[in-house]
Amino acid sequence: MGNPPSDDDERFPDNGEGRSMKDSDDREEWHNLTLETRDRRQSDVHDGLSRRERTVLTQLQQGMSNKEISLALGISPRTVQKHLQRIYYHLGVQTRVEAIVWMHQRVR
């Protein structure tokens, strides 16, 4: 996405609120949008799964329970369950076993 706007960058005029992209809040917003775009591109690479979902899937493949995954990642078991629901949907499977089989078929 390029470099953040510099103090002399004319591409970012006043935003109508008396501030320009030179302001630190706008630079921070630009930086966050850059990170979101990068993350979105990376998540599109693997069947629409986010980086976190791929991590959960890998841990699932290692035989970890939802509770074990939640402890390893520092998230709640409910969040793990939501990640698994999204993983199952994107992989076109319905169970943990089917997700693991899907992973094994892709690794070969």
Image (cartoon, grey):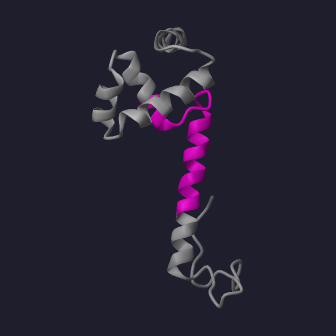
In the rendered image, the vertical position of residue 15 relative to residue 42, given as above or below: below
For image coordinates 60% across by 51% down, the residue present is 37
Left or right of 48 on screen, residue 31: left
How many marks do you count on the picture?
0
Image quarter of residue 66 = top left
Left or right of 95 on screen, residue 5: right
In the rendered image, the vertical position of residue 21 relative to residue 59, given as above or below: below
Q: Is residue 52 magenta?
A: yes
Question: What residue range appears in magenta?
Answer: 32-55
In the rendered image, the vertical position of residue 34 relative to residue 79, given as above or below: below
Q: Position of residue 10 (x, y in %)?
A: 70, 82
For image coordinates 49% across by 32% down, the residue present is 83
Left or right of 34 on screen, residue 72: left
For image coordinates 45% across by 36% down, the residue present is 52
Q: Position of residue 105 (x, y in %)?
A: 53, 8
Image quarter of residue 75 = top left
